[in-house]
Image (cartoon, rainbow, N blue to C red):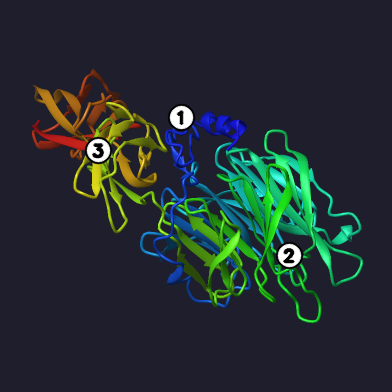
Amino acid sequence: MTDVRERKLSAFNFPNKRRLLKTITIFLVLFVMVAPVLFASPVRGETVVATISLGTGPASPIASGIDVDPLSNLIFVADSANNVVVEIDGHTNTVAATSPTLDYYGPYGLAVNPQTHKIFVTDTDIYGHSTGLVSVLDETTLLRVATVGLAGNPTQVAVNPVTDRVYVEEFTGTAVDVIDGSTYSVLARISVSCAAGTDPSRCNSAGITVNPVTNKVYASFTTPTCCPSSGYTSVFAIDGSTNAVTANVTYADWLLASNRIPFGLATNSETNMLYAVSGPDISLYIQNSDSLHVIDASTMSIVTSIPLGQNNSTMGVGVDEATNRIYAGHGTVFVIDGTTNTVATTVQNIATIGVAVNPATSLIYVSGLGNSVMVVAGPSPSTHATRTVVACDPGSAAVNQAAQCAATVTDTTSSPTAPTGTVSFTSNSSGTFSPSSTCILNPASSSASSCTVSYSPNVGSEGGHRITGTYGADSTHFASRGGFNLAITKRSTSTGVSCTGHSSKFTCTASVSDRSPGMPLTPTGTVTWTSSSTSKKSAFSPPSCTLNGIGATAGCTTSYSNAGRSTSVTITARYSGDTDHLGTNGSTTLTT
């Protein structure tokens, strides 16, 4: 590893150089993206461990858009048959949720930013139809929070979680669009040109990936030569700081020999290697190289092209940075040893278009034709996967009422040990953690540790508070993240009424008290007075009054008259509530 690379790693404040834990912002302390420098030796071989049905409906023509949030261990799939995004729970390998219909021609590319909990989904079907939109979904709800319009048809998409930039390839625009992941504005449109001597009108997108350590973006575009039986693919390096194309490399495979099916490009940010697919063979029409191309990203030169055997093409590709294994395939998944650049093994009969890898669990998720995702177990990483569960007590609290939020971090491997280190808490709303937003784990069992912080929702923050706990990893455990939806309500009140006087003239006082646990707030607002008397001479002056007071109780006064014969009258004070208090009624009975 060069001195330059060491400086880049230290710039992200990695606490443990055996894995690349990136410091994203002061609010998200640590985030696992990649893997140990010392790669693990295989303990288990690659085998299919689950087939996850995405639901009913027609067989999906493509399901390439697939990505993993390694901290929450959630997998997201663009289901183009049903125009939805499907969420898979990586702990159980089952479908956990499905988004509302996106009203798309077909969800195509998909990428997740684990820092912001946002999912970016592009819209283009295999026939080239598109709304030109990129939809932004909230990971916790799968609801669409924004759309971004582009000049061309958006296809593949990649995210840099460090800079919060989103990169989208246009299918026929020969360009890469740069989107600000927080404002959802288009910052730049980077134009590229396909290889010389090829047909520029057919220069189409063929995969995009990001190295967050070097802040480099790699986008591939492919085009045929003058004759329809051959072509070239060019991979362009883009500087994420300047949005300028700095280099490119070209290889002799034409990826779009058939319909507009997507293709893969992947990077290992630990080794700074790129992996580019060869595309499918089309019988009697085109024969591609049937190889996986390994590119040194530092020099943008092909290191080697790994032969996979005749008619063994590649379309999707993913990298497990924890084990330095590369997974590429079409009808068969080829497992490449990244150290030797040789085929280590194969997994047969998997229709592969999209590949996503969780480096914490070394589980590989393969999407393709049909309504299912195949799960392949890779070699066990030397660093143990964890699961973080957050629970708050009470589960529903009032503003200014503290809830105790505990994070439990469990080692989910077959030989578990208790995780050590810290958990950092954040809220998507307004509140205060104490004694701080970080707590130190204490062993709870041989496989789990826990710690607790107190959370007080601020005044005016009624609604849902998403409390997130992020475990920052230790030397033998991966980071993970969990969340809890804490319901925050207005504070409860009680209203008391007292009246003094005699005959038909009284002075009545309403006292409104804050009754919720925690630090009380002084009730504000108005009290409206009513009487059960049917006499037209019954009256309040004034008919409503404004509360005044300090501490937990506030009050106000009115005068009541009820000229006429003596009778029993119920006097009622109705408090309407305020920003942070619920309304209540109180009453008393008078004899006039």
Residue 103 seen in render: no
Mark 2 or mark 3: which comes first in sequence? Answer: 2
Amino acid found under the numbered disc labelled 2: His
Say if mark 3 contacts mark 1, CB within 8 Å: no
**Vertical comparison of 137 with 450: above or below:** below
- Name the residue at 66% across, 46% down: 167
Amino acid found under the numbered disc labelled 1: Ile
Name the front one of labels 2 and 3: 3
Mark 2 or mark 1: which comes first in sequence? Answer: 1
Observer-nearest of 336 and 64: 336
Please tell me the numbered disc located at residue 129: 2
Q: Position of residue 433 (x, y in %)?
A: 31, 30
Please tell me the numbered disc located at residue 451: 3
Observer-nearest of 411 and 393: 411
Observer-nearest of 407 and 366: 366
Q: Pick the quarter of the image with the N terminus.
A: top right
**Vertical comparison of 376 with 27: above or below:** below
> Seen in the image, is 498 located left or right of residue 360?
left
Q: Position of residue 403 (x, y in %)?
A: 25, 37
Amino acid found under the numbered disc labelled 3: Cys
Please tell me the numbered disc located at residue 26: 1
Q: Position of residue 389 (x, y in %)?
A: 30, 48
- Name the residue at 66% across, 59% down: 123
> Seen in the image, is 497 located left or right of residue 86?
left
- Name the residue at 14% across, 23% down: 506
The residues bearing labels 3 and 1 have C-alpha atoms spaced at a distance of: 20 Å
The residues bearing labels 2 and 3 have C-alpha atoms spaced at a distance of: 51 Å
Q: Residues within 10 Å of mark 3 (few under 14, many from 20)?
A: some
**Vertical comparison of 131 with 553: above or below:** below
Observer-nearest of 98 and 225: 225
